[in-house]
Structures are given as structure tokens and as C-alpha cells.
Amino acid sequence: MVKRVIYIHGFNSSEKSYKAVRFGELMAHYDVDYYVPRLNHEPLQAIIELEQLITPNTALLGSSLGGFFATYLSQRYHIPAVVINPAVAPGNLLQPLLGANYNPYQDYNYELNNRHIDALKVLTLSELKHPELLYLLQQTGDEVLNFQHAVNYYSHCKQLIEFGGDHSFIGFERTIASIVDFLKLNKTS
């Protein structure tokens, strides 16, 4: 039984993202502890921070780069995860962003370099050993990531594919019931 849900935000985002906050409001009605850590831009540091929160009864919800991290952790720790418009191979995707970057949601500057790209490539899983633990929420109108990459990569997983939308996953609230069902969350008494 899931007792802890961790929301993992995406690249250059924060714990204050719309989906993180909205899902947190809904989790107040469920018998779970809800965590949304502010993640470091260093991929391996972010993974370490997330691993410290994982217990045997943990489930994950991740968006974009957070979906990539959720996939890795789900497969490593054998826990369920819902991934929303996830990055499939962020090591390749972030290559054009090497150099100076600014995270407006956390208000800090940092340097994205090849060490970060290499770390993401190390965390990339060539195949999903436990696809039954993953649920893909994908909109085809994602203007940031090629939706077909996720549909193919998660082909053996439960999927909800919506035509249109965008990278933020328009109408996220419509998916709440299916997320709760997939994660088998219990309402508070």
C-alpha cells in the first residue's frame, strides 16, 4: 500500500509548479505523505536527494525531466511511477543548452556542462525491466519533447495518450482519478 507520494519537477522548474501544487491539494484527501523536493540542477545530486525520500511504500509522479528521474527510480527500487510528458533521453535533449542557464522558478544561475550530460546518459535505461510499474500520460501537442519517443519507449506500459495539448499537459486534473487508481491510493477516513 502506497504511503508516500513524491512529485518530481522538471528541468528549470521547482516545487511550485502547477501540477505539483494541484496534485498536493488533492493528496490532502488521501492517506499519504506528499513530498515535492526542490531539486538541484546536478542530475546525480537530484537522484541522491530523491533516493533519501524513498521508502518501500513510495510512489512517484514526475513531469518532463522529473519523468525521466521517476522512470529510473521506479525501475531501480521497484516502485510505481506516473510520468507526464517525460524526457526519454535528456542527455541528448539538453546538449544544445550547454553553458550558462537560469532557473527562473528557483531564481539562480548555473552552468550546464558535459558532466551533467554524461550523468544523464548514465541514468538512461536502454529498456524497462518492469514496465508494469509505469503509467505514461502523454499529449501529442508537446512543443518541447517529441511525444512519439515517449510513446515508443513506454510501449509496454499503461498509457493515456491525448491528442493536442502541450508540454504542461493541459487539463491535468482530468487524469487525477486514473493516477489515483494506478497508484492504488486510499482516501483518508
Image (cartoon, rainbow, N blue to C red):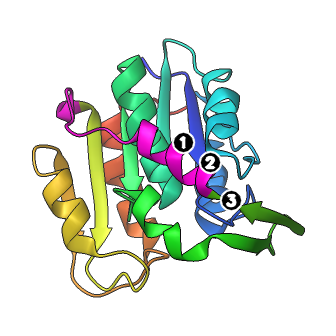
Compared with residue 68, is residue 126 higher up or lower down, i.e. above or below?
A: above
Q: Secondary structure at mark 1?
A: helix
| Residue 29 seen anywhere in this rendered image of the structure | no
| Residue at the spot 25% in from the left edge and 61% down from the top edge | 150
Q: Secondary structure at mark 2?
A: helix
Q: Are marks 2 and 1 in contact (CB under 8 Å)?
A: yes
| Residue 70 seen anywhere in this rendered image of the structure | yes
Say which of 8 and 103 sits in front. 103
Left/right of residue 116 with respect to residue 186 in the rendered view? right
Give the label on residue 3, or none. Answer: none
Q: Secondary structure at mark 3?
A: helix
Residue 125 in magenta stretch: yes
Q: Going from the N terminus, do you reach mark 3 or mark 2 first? A: 3
Residue 39 spot, x, y in % from top left: 72, 47
Residue bounds of the magenta highlight? 114-132
Spatial CA distance of label 3 from label 1 is: 28 Å
Looking at the image, is mark 3 or mark 2 nearer the viewer? 2
Q: Are marks 3 and 2 in contact (CB under 8 Å)?
A: no
Residue topped by disc 2: 115
Residue topped by disc 1: 119
Residue topped by disc 3: 21
